[in-house]
Image (cartoon, rainbow, N blue to C red):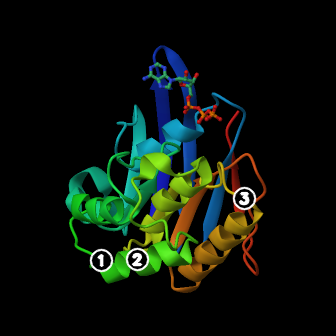
């Protein structure tokens, strides 16, 4: 379980949010809503431990995440609004590199299967710089299929995706939740996971 208590964050001299508290249990999904600049990305990055909160605590399974360190990162998969892929590498290499950075290995067959599921068959061996924006986003999102992180933190996962890929994302998130996973995401587009009530957290 993720527990957030009395969280506060400022960027520059601007207070983005304070007194923010919520819990997220296995099988739950939460959307962070708010206008441009309201602090959605900053909140997600704080939950990942990339930004130190000014106040408050983030607990994972009852322990402070900053003390858990690597043990927390092993439970977490963050996909930012930038794709974090290397232009010169192909999709297979990018996926294997992402796994390596996260501390595990995936075989070429596993990576190829993930890319196929993301609709990238016959694009696996091209340098990603030649792929379309939507295809590049699909390469980034294929990371969801190769790890076993319980907590997915997704910043604008639907950006550049077509209708079919949005449907696929909803399906993947649904599968993740049904296996006891949890997810926090931002999006300016509708995202509906069948049979699951999406909790809402509004930043102003
Ligand atoms: N490193 C920084 N230094 C100063 N200000 C920052 C920094 N990073 C973010 N900000 C500011 O913090 C505010 C919140 O930014 P953030 O990216 O969290 O918003 P957001 O809700 O995700 O926005 P969007 O919907 O446009 O993606 C913005 O006003 C932004 O300019």
Residue 69 pos. (x, y %): 22, 55
Question: Element under label 1?
Answer: helix
**In the image, residue 66 above or below residue 52:** below
Residue 156 visible in the picture: no
Residue 27 pos. (x, y %): 58, 78
Mark 2 CB near ligand 1 (8 Å cut): no
Residue bearing the label numbered 1: 108
Residue bearing the label numbered 3: 162
Q: CA distance from mark 2 to mark 1?
A: 6 Å
Q: Is residue 49 left or right of residue 131?
A: left
Which residue ends up furthest to the top in the rendered image?
Answer: 13
Pick the front one: 121 or 28? 121
Query: Marks 1 and 3: CB-CB under 8 Å?
Result: no
Q: Is residue 7 left or right of residue 52?
A: right
Residue bearing the label numbered 2: 112
Q: Residue at x 27, y 50 (%)?
A: 66
Q: Quadrant of residue 30?
A: bottom right
Pick the front one: 203 or 153? 153
Name the image quarter holding the N terminus: bottom left
**In the image, residue 139 above or below residue 108:** above
Question: Element under label 3?
Answer: loop
Q: Residues within 10 Å of mark 2 (few under 14, many from 20)?
A: many
Mark 3 CB near ligand 1 (8 Å cut): no
Query: Of the residues under marks 1 and 3, which one precedes in the sequence?
Result: 1
Pick the front one: 173 or 122? 122
């Amino acid at each position: 379980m993720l527990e957030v208590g009395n969280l506060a964050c400022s960027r520059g001299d601007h207070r983005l949010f304070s007194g923010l508290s919520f819990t997220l249990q296995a099988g739950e999904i939460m959307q962070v809503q708010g206008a441009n600049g309201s602090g959605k990305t900053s909140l997600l990055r704080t939950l990942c431990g990339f930004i130190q909160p000014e106040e408050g605590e983030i607990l994972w399974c009852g322990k402070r995440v900053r003390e858990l360190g690597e043990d927390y990162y092993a439970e977490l998969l963050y996909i930012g609004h930038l794709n974090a892929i290397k232009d010169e590498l192909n999709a297979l290499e990018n996926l294997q590199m992402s796994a390596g950075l996260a501390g595990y290995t995936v075989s070429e067959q596993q990576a190829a299967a993930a890319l196929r599921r993301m609709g990238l068959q016959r694009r696996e061996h091209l340098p990603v710089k030649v792929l379309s924006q939507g295809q590049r986003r699909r390469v980034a999102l294929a990371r969801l299929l190769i790890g076993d992180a319980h907590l997915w933190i997704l910043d604008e996962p639907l950006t550049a995706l077509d209708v079919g890929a949005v449907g696929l994302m909803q399906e993947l998130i649904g599968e993740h939740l049904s296996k006891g996973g949890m997810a926090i995401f931002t999006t300016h587009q509708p995202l509906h996971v069948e049979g699951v009530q999406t909790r809402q957290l509004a930043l102003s």
